[in-house]
Amino acid sequence: MNVLNRNFVVSFCVCLLCIVFSSGAIFANDYKGWEENSEYNSYYNYKERDSLKGTLEKFEKVTPMPGMDPGTAFYLDEGGDKIIVHLCPWDYADPKETGIRKGVKTKVKGSWAEINGQDVFMGAKVKQGEDFEFKVRLTKDGKPFWTMGPEELAKELSSK
């Protein structure tokens, strides 16, 4: 094998390894503090799901607990009560990527929790109008979508 071919083979192998390792990182869905068995996710109780209705006022970038990656949250005005709703890690879906709109009547399903002395609503599904839905947790057990592998997530997202 001549030097040119050997350099090509080595370069090709290095590129292939980079692709394999970087795609593993992409699909690992490892958001610090947001892991499936994290302390934060242990607060979500799928057996005590609740539903809220109101108008979405504004989005906010939150850090639910010290050391966590930031998350996407919004304030819901429910008849004068301002409720903060935690959705997901910011890098999983920021406000623009959620498709959820401010100033619109909104229905949220999820679970109440007290985190760092603050009452928060941990959202599982957000509905606006008849045709729009943004879902981030399984109904049957509360598993977060951002912790799923690509095949499982694709299956869930296609079943909407």
Image: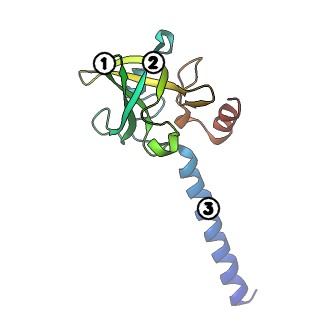
Pair 3/2: label in front? 2
Of mark 3 and mark 2, the one earlier in the sequence is 3
Q: CA distance from mark 1 to mark 3?
A: 51 Å
- Residue 116 picture quarter: top left
Q: Which mark is residue 55?
A: none
Pair 1/3: label in front? 1
Q: Which residue: 70% across, 77% down?
A: 9
Q: Position of residue 150 (x, y in %)?
A: 64, 42
Q: Which mark is residue 53?
A: 2
Residue bearing mark 1: 80
Q: Position of residue 133 (x, y in %)?
A: 58, 30
Q: Nearer the viewer, residue 132 or 136?
A: 132
The quarter of the image holding the C terminus is: top right
Residue bearing mark 3: 19
Query: Is the residue marked by circle 3 packed among few (<14), some (14-19), or many (20+) residues within 10 Å?
Result: few
Q: Is residue 18 left or right of residue 87?
A: right
Q: CA distance from mark 3 to mark 2?
A: 44 Å
Q: Give the secondary structure at mark 3.
A: helix
Q: Which residue: 50% across, 15% down?
A: 46
Of mark 1 and mark 3, the one earlier in the sequence is 3
Q: Amino acid at mark 3?
A: Ile
Q: Give the secondary structure at mark 2.
A: strand
Q: Is residue 91 left or right of residue 67?
A: right
